[in-house]
Amino acid sequence: MAVLTMAKAINDGLRAAMERDPKVLVMGEDVGKLGGVFRVTDGLQKDFGEQRVLDTPLAESGIIGTAVGLAIRGFRPVCEIQFDGFVFPGYDQIVSQLAKLHFRSQGKVPMPVVVRIPFGGGIGAVEHHSESPEALFAHVAGLKVVACSNPVDAYWMIQQAIASDDPVIFFEPKRRYWEKAEVDVTAEPQPLHTSRVARPGSSLSIAGYGPVLKTCLDAAEAAVADGHDIEVIDLRTLSPLDLGPVFDSVRRTGRLVVVAEAPSETSVAAEVCARVQQECFHSLEAPVLRVTGFDTPYPPSKCEEDYLPDLDRVLDAVDRSMGW
Amino acid sequence: MSTPQDWTPPTSTDSHPGHDHVVAGLKGTDEGGADLVQLLTPEGERVPDPRFDAYAADVDVEMLKNLYRDLVLVRRFDREGNALQRQGQLGIWVPLLGQEAAQIGAGRAMAPQDMAFPSYREHGVAWTRGVDPTDLLGIFRGTDHGSWDPKATGFHLYTIVIGNQCLNATGYAMGQKFEGRVGGDDAEATICFFGDGATSQGDVHEGFVWAAVYDAPVVFYCQNNQWAISEPTERQTRVPLYKRAQGYGFDGIRVDGNDVIACLAVTRWALEECRTGNGPVLIEAFTYRMDAHTTSDDPTRYRLADELELWKLKDPIERVRVHLVRSLGVEPEFFDGVQADADALAARFRQHCVDMPAPAADRIFSEVYADGSPAVDAQREAFLAYHASFEGV
Ligand SMILES: Cc1ncc(C[n+]2csc(CCOP(=O)(O)OP(=O)(O)O)c2C)c(N)n1
């Protein structure tokens, strides 16, 4: 079994999808010779040529808009957006065309496009490089939104997203790109749109996704010393949300903490809270708590340690929930 | 889903457009030839230009010495920025090496009442607007998003999202016009800085459209440094960028971006065009990024060392020095003095960086809204209480 970083796992997944189907294209700024600013597309242009790995002009609306046209023509483009904060010039194309063509054409025009977005903070970057805009996409009907949290998922989910005939916004936690895991490329993958119990437990549930999943697992580990047996659920899919495993978990533990980097109001975390209180009201021993970024623009990087949910803030929420 | 049998893609990796491949139009990075405005050659020789000499008529020895000083000091603190990043004092640095003349020339052409909208590499323009170089450090150290006052300096905050500022600059210039500040004694103009890559963005195109439709007094100043991270100018255009202006109905001009006198003259002309109501104007300053895109970038992956060597021969500072020495007889003491000033600036820059305090944690919540927000206020209170709970633990 190969030990891969998340960046390499996505690279391998892209390569496998490109080998399988010659109509899979990779496109974006600097994805060719440079291999992308995070090297996720490293070596692909060398092996597949400039018409399958396109160094595009510097324009996100252009990248998404032409991908839509290519998809109409039968291609399966995978667009790379360099950083979360740069997707907005392409947001109009995503919302107006990518998300709606299948519905408008009543299925005659499928949109097998993947938009890869490295997201989240924690890398000490300047502004526009650390945002968590997933709710803005999850709120748009017609898009599917997923977030991987580890190399195994990254390897499979990118291939499943490419194989899907729906547009998939694919969030990659950039501060976890260099974390490693064993990836068994012969194993049967988890379906794309399901959440997953990442750590079983019985006294409290934590749900998270993307970059904070590691923080959640670390918190669960740290809480053992206090006698807590915490279950951690990796949401994986943000639209549609697969909350079945969360409901099951909360029915057993009676307590839930939802963790995410994004601001909290009208967020994915907010949606999880609302649905859990609706479905699991009689099982809850404490209010569902949220540990998130604040409802402010992402701060200068010297403040990001305070902004991002860390082990202490998650444990603090665990204590509050347990003490209810 | 397509079947693999449908179609076989070409495997050639050689579709990069070059002279042979581009059948119509010019290669985007070709030097301007007869169209390139140049007043000082790479060899340091002052050459006449019937159109623009008038805009450099006051460039005497004293003034050229000042321009030289600008160039050297800006390069010096830029190099210090790079070094500070390497030493872990800055998260990132965006070098301007090679673009000093393009920036000093444009910046020194501005009048106090004018307004500049920079991208993120305009440390030289900042210098000419009186922004202390130390004020640039916070962005790259991660303590703020730009600490200078855009109103007081006539220098807007840096813009990282490519091309965004072109529409903002155009809107600002429209405002200057609506307020009657075009044509009169108190005439104003705006200048907007962006790169060759940015010209692909919709915002830049829309900026051109708006500026033309409203005759906005805005100079679009494109520093074509030949690369947008790893992508050469050919990845953005098929015609030289200055020629695009014609399609929008205004003047476009290409200037030797490594020639500080030409950049000064051409920008003065363009700003005057705007002040007198003949704007907008597009300037393409033809220059070269001699360092990496940022300290996070690795240019060896995409460009040849030969190219850099070629551009070193066109260095913007060296040609001024040669001219000052050979043609104007400036003594070595002057250069020693500039060097000493540069070293002192670098030392002050470094010390300031190392001494910068980390922002207070509640910086996260400050000035999110002009009118405040109960939700943000509540989060701040909770956050401060949470922090206080650790005290004495
Ligand atoms: C909208 C947007 N997309 C992508 C980026 C990432 N990025 C930062 S600089 C850059 C290249 C810019 O090239 P150019 O406009 O030529 O300016 P230069 O940096 O060469 O001065 C890219 C792609 C960004 N900042 N904003």
Image (tube, coloured by chain):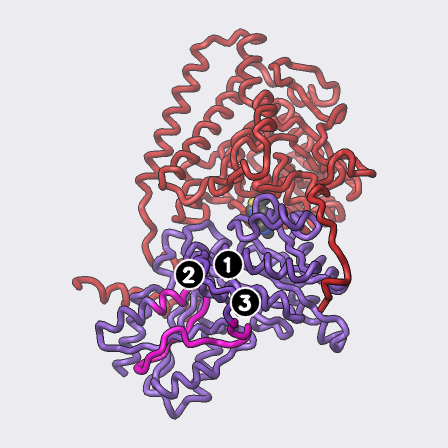
Disc nearer the start of the sequence (1/2): 1
- From the image, state the color of chain A: purple
Point out residue A255 in the picture as x, y percentages from the top left corner. Answer: 34, 82
Residue A181 - label: 2
| Quadrant holding the C terminus of chain A | bottom left
Q: Around disc 3, counting alpha carbons within 10 Å, would you say few (fewer than 14), some (14 to 19), or many (20 or more)? A: many
Q: Residue at x 64, y 17 (%)?
A: B41
Q: Nearer the viewer, residue A310 or B269?
A: A310
Q: Quadrant of residue A98?
A: bottom right
User: What is the secondary structure assignment of the residue under circle 2?
Assistant: strand
Q: Residue at x 45, y 56 (%)?
A: A5
* Circle 3 chain: A
- From the image, state the color of chain B: red
Disc nearer the start of the sequence (2/3): 3
Q: Amino acid at mark 3?
A: Met
Q: Amino acid at mark 2?
A: Ala
Is residue A44 inside the magenta stretch? Answer: no
Q: In the image as oriented, which residue stretches furthest toward the right?
A: B24
Is residue A207 inside the magenta stretch? Answer: yes
User: What is the secondary structure assignment of the residue under circle 1?
Assistant: helix
Q: Amino acid at mark 1?
A: Ala
Q: Are marks 3 and 1 in contact (CB under 8 Å)?
A: no
Point out residue B354 in the picture as x, y percentages from the top left corner. Answer: 32, 39
Q: Around disc 1, counting alpha carbons within 10 Å, would you say few (fewer than 14), some (14 to 19), or many (20 or more)? A: many
Q: Residue at x 43, y 19 (%)?
A: B338
**Residue under pointer 1:** A9
Point out residue B258 in the picture as x, y percentages from the top left corner. Answer: 60, 25
Q: Is residue A144 left or right of residue A273?
A: right
Residue A157 - label: 3
The magenta segment: A188-217
